[in-house]
Image (spheres, rainbow, N blue to C red):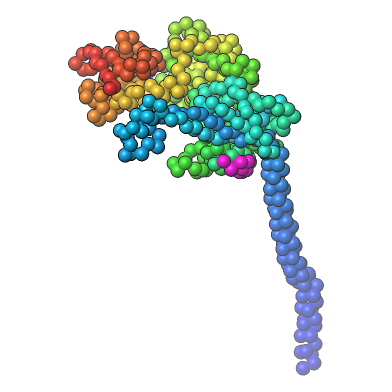
Amino acid sequence: MIKVRGPLFIIFLIILSFLLGWGGKQIWTKFHNKGLVAEDNIRLSSESLSAAQKLSEAFSFIAEKAAPAVVYIETERVITSPFRQMPPMEFFGDEFFKRFFSPPRYKERGAGSGFILSKDGYIVTNNHVIEGAQKITVKLVDGRFFKAKVIGTDPFSDVALLKIEATNLPVLTLGNSDLLRIGEWVIAIGNPFGLTHTITVGVISAKGRSGIGISDIEDFIQTDAAINPGNSGGPLLNLRGEVIGMNTAIFTRSGGYMGIGFAIPINIVKTVVEQLKAKGKVERGWLGVVIQDLNPTLAEELGLKITEGVVITEVIPDSPAAKADLKEKDVIVAINKKSVKNASELRSHILLTKPGTEIILDIIRNGQKIEKKVTIEAPKKEILTSKTELEQLNNFLEELGFLVSDITPEMQKKYRLPSAEGVIIVEVIPESPADYARLSPGIIIDEVNRKKIKNLREFYQALKPSLQNRKVLLGIKTRYGRQYITLKLD
């Protein structure tokens, strides 16, 4: 038995030595590593919390520094109305005639935001905040009130410059909106619903937004920082505390914040303010072309492989474009080597260019890319149509009951039109003056108020006198021939 136990005992000692040696070391290392992982998690959590606290401190620091230079703007104008708040029982009584011949006047008030540009009292805000106001009051964060003077306004870009009589005011630093990146943190400061100096935080959701219908010049910054009525004119700041945009509008179906706000890039604001401060107005640039977006269908028709750009559909005689030998069907793809995606982007760039400035256009003609140098000029008064006037003309057309469009190659094929001159009716509203006159989609209008027209621009130009007399004489082409009709609003 002793001979048997001896070898077993020796084997037992060898196994025990292994466990206490290399194997034990591995077991110890395993448990020790678990402790390190836990310690690492604690350390990483601490670092994340520290980073979040630093970001929070940055927001607070910027808000505290910027808030004194953000102002609350109150506007007031006097409205005269004979029918305001008239009791129904007195509609044709003595009170009615008293109000009709001596109508009461009442004050209409509005509010918005703005921010201080200089220590001597120059303040920038949205044009729509102060438009039509007879009295403008600016309130500072320290409680002081000042009467503001309008230095200049620019409805095209929705920018206005005010001045108050004060000195040593806090100011904001203007940044460079061209350097913005999507996803970058931003801070909005304003006075939504009269709640002064409200701070909201978000990110840049998109850049170069256009076609929204807010203003003639559209190159908006889109942000999800909460912007509400009353925020208009307030600053949008980056984490360096620089103003990179001016809050101007929201996309909403409820009247309140829905996560989509728009700001005018500060580089546009700076360009406009510079001219307003010097001259009280902005000199607009004019190229002299009628344009439309390049779409895949049109690109295929023109034999192009690109899908972004601007197609010239007409060159106005004796215009900068005509002098530079631009032609119909030329596709503009860049201005000064910066790509152009659509017609709205091109229009905004030209409108912001001072007359006398030479620009370089990259265009594609017959499949070949070429450069054209163009000297921008001031627009001719009879050609420039403001956004407000355009809205009035479109409202008048809606009352008449029809909508028109330039004749595109697709429409020319669809309706088998012999030429593309004039405008085409694209919609007729039932039971409207146009409907009763038997107008219908596909009919061509080539004359308005005794003036021959070739396109939509000339159509609107010839339609302007109709805003006064509320009637229009149209020369139309149908499959039965050419005829004249008169539409009139009572």
* 357 vs 97, nearest the viewer: 97
Is residue 197 found inside the magenta-colored segment of the image? yes
Q: Quadrant of the N terminus?
A: bottom right
Query: Residue 154: horizontal and vertical position, in percent?
Result: 55, 22
Q: Position of residue 16 (x, y in %)?
A: 78, 79
x and y percentages locating residue 12 in the rendered image: 77, 82
Q: Is residue 99 left or right of residue 438?
A: right
On screen, residue 488 versus residue 326, left or right, reads: left
- Residue at position x 54%, y 41% from top? 193
- The residue located at (25%, 16%) in the rendering is 486
Provide the residue span drawn in magenta.
194-203
Q: Check residue 330 for magenta coloring.
A: no
Query: Height in image: 435 above or below 318?
Result: below
Instruction: Say which quarter of the image contains residue 67.
Output: top right
Determine the residue positioned at 59% across, 39% down. 191
- Residue pushed farthest bottom? 1
Given residues 50 and 325, the one toward you in this image is 50
Q: Position of residue 109 (x, y in %)?
A: 52, 34
